[in-house]
Image (cartoon, grey):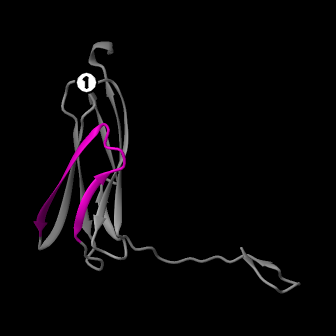
Amino acid sequence: MVHTNDPRNSVMELMVSGMVEKFAEIRPERVRLSGRVGEPVTAVAEIVPRPDYPFKIKNIRAMNGRHIRFSLANKTAAGNTIYEITVTSTRQDAGSISDVVYLDTDSPIRPTLQVTVSGTIIDAKKETP
């Protein structure tokens, strides 16, 4: 909505459309950690910079970090850098996992990327066969 000083058209509706380019490919877009208490539960996400928007990841951090551990690794495929985030559950009891991993980049266009982490750890003793 646009407000104007024209008494006959004081409010106008404005619609904007266009193409939105991805800054990076994040695969999968969300990390899901599901498993049983006492078993290792890990997932990997790849971050691939788009050729038009190259960047480097300077830092990785979690919003909370209470039930996860994470690490960042670089690999090269066809001359392109691919970042791999490995996220592991540190939860020692049954319950849910909900967090966000932030990736600080050197790009002024997108200084921070984020990967949502969620999941459930169940107690294997309470499962029915």
Amino acid tagged 1: Val
The image shows residue 102 at horizontal and vertical percentages of 33, 56
Q: Which residue is mark 1?
A: 37
The image shows residue 49 at horizontal and vertical percentages of 26, 70
The image shows residue 47 at horizontal and vertical percentages of 25, 61
The image shows residue 15 at horizontal and vertical percentages of 64, 76
Report if residue 115 is visible in the image: yes
Is 73 magenta? The answer is yes
Q: Quadrant of residue 6?
A: bottom right
Q: Quadrant of residue 97?
A: top left
Looking at the picture, does residue 35 appear above or below residue 32?
above
Decide if residue 83 is on the left or right side of residue 128. left
Report if residue 129 is visible in the image: no
Looking at the picture, does residue 33 appear above or below residue 2?
above
Span colored in magenta: 56-77
Q: Element type at marker 1?
A: loop
Residue at left 19%, top 27%?
39
Residue at left 11%, top 71%?
78
